[in-house]
Image: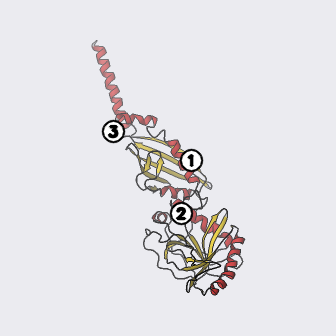
Amino acid sequence: MAAVGRTLIIVIVVVLGLGAALYFLGPKTASRSQTLEIERPAATVLARLSSTPVGATVAEGVTISDLPTTEGDTVTAPVTFSGGGTGRVSYQVTADGEGSNVNFKLEEDLGANPLNRFAAITGGNVAPLIAGAASAVETDLNALPNATFAGLQYNVVNVAARPFFFVENCSDTSPESVTSIISQAVVAIPPVMRSNSLTVNGDLMAVEPRVVSNQYCYQVGYPYSGRQPRALLIGKIGETPAGQALRVVYTGTEADVVAQVYDPMDALLAAAHLDNPATREDDWVTYEVYHDDPTQAGGSRNREIFYVAQGDISSLTRIAPPTDVAVPANAPAVEAPATTTEIPATTAPVPATTTP
């Protein structure tokens, strides 16, 4: 009997020793990972993940608790679980041709409870969440514009509202249709303004050239001076957009402006979580100012493109800091570049008003 007792004691000691070793030396987190194939440029993907806002949902009951940090090709952010637990989410982004691969990993800290520590073997609370979380990340990233903002230059300015006379029209998205609309505006609008005792007080502008049902829709016109008309048979009056804006100077042709400015800027806004990448209908208020002859073959070669800011743009300036952009010599003066990136836009899109 004594031998049996000694053996039992030895077995108990060994089991307790193994349990203690597993507790102190074993994994302190439960984790699962999954590799995602993303059909978008790695730089754009990395930028969007690195600007994930606090409070964003990773999976049901799992939210980002602090701003992500980026080291090389890896983004890491702390998370909280609905039950009060903490953990991390990480994304390692690698280029794969014109697309990218993302190694997505979700971890939960197991704490001091031995039962929780042993749960690391089966993935704990993370295991049932990883598939849905990975699917949500994949869907979000593949909705990004298939473009990169590398090389895009912009600066931040404050612009003031000015009286604006304009006509509204839409055209298909071909460069020929766009230049045709602008050319017609140069010929048709100034006589209407003169007939209403309005003086052209600035270069031609096209406000909100956004896509609606596969058409670009514009408010095309000129800033003006003069007494506001009591009634207008042709055209409308309002104000040019105002507030903090991102400004791009463009010197190419109409045929290249989408690829060189609008697609990269859409990619930057989406990467900064300042625009819904799944749709183009909610784009920021934009406008173009033509500083030369927009009726020449290929359209204006000297224009400024403005994106009126929608709230805090600090996430955007962290991803792609503004640069000093050369302004065309005949461009109208604007206020000095904004000294902060946290001033919200002061106006909504151009109000269209007429006086009875």
Where residue 324 appears, x then y in whole percent? 51, 75
Which element is circle 2 on?
helix
Q: Amino acid at mark 1?
A: Leu
The residue at which mark 3 appears reads as 112
Q: Is residue 291 left or right of residue 341?
A: right
Task: Point out the residue furthest to the top here.
Answer: 1
Any part of residue 194 in sight: yes
Crowdedness of circle 3 by 10 Å Cα count: few (<14), some, many (20+)? few
Which amino acid does the dot numbered 2 rest on? Leu
Residue annotated with mark 1: 36
Q: Say if residue 72 shows up in the picture.
A: no
Give the CA distance from mark 1 to mark 2. 23 Å
Q: Which mark is residue 292?
A: none
Please state which of the two labelled residues, at mark 3 or mark 2, is closer to the viewer. Answer: 2
User: As displayed, is residue 288 above or below residue 55?
Assistant: below
Q: Are marks 3 and 2 in contact (CB under 8 Å)?
A: no
Numbered disc 1: secondary structure: strand
Residue nearest the viewer, comparing 262 with 200: 200
In percent of width and height, residue 215 lies at 67, 65
Image check: 197 left or right of 173?
A: left
State the residue position of label 2.
269
Are there few (<14), some (14-19), or many (20+) residues within 10 Å of tag 1? some
Q: Residue at x 43, y 73 (%)?
A: 339
Picture quarter containing residue 1?
top left
Query: Which SS class for mark 3?
Result: loop
Where is 153 relative to 66, above or below?
below
Residue 62: x and y in percent read: 44, 46
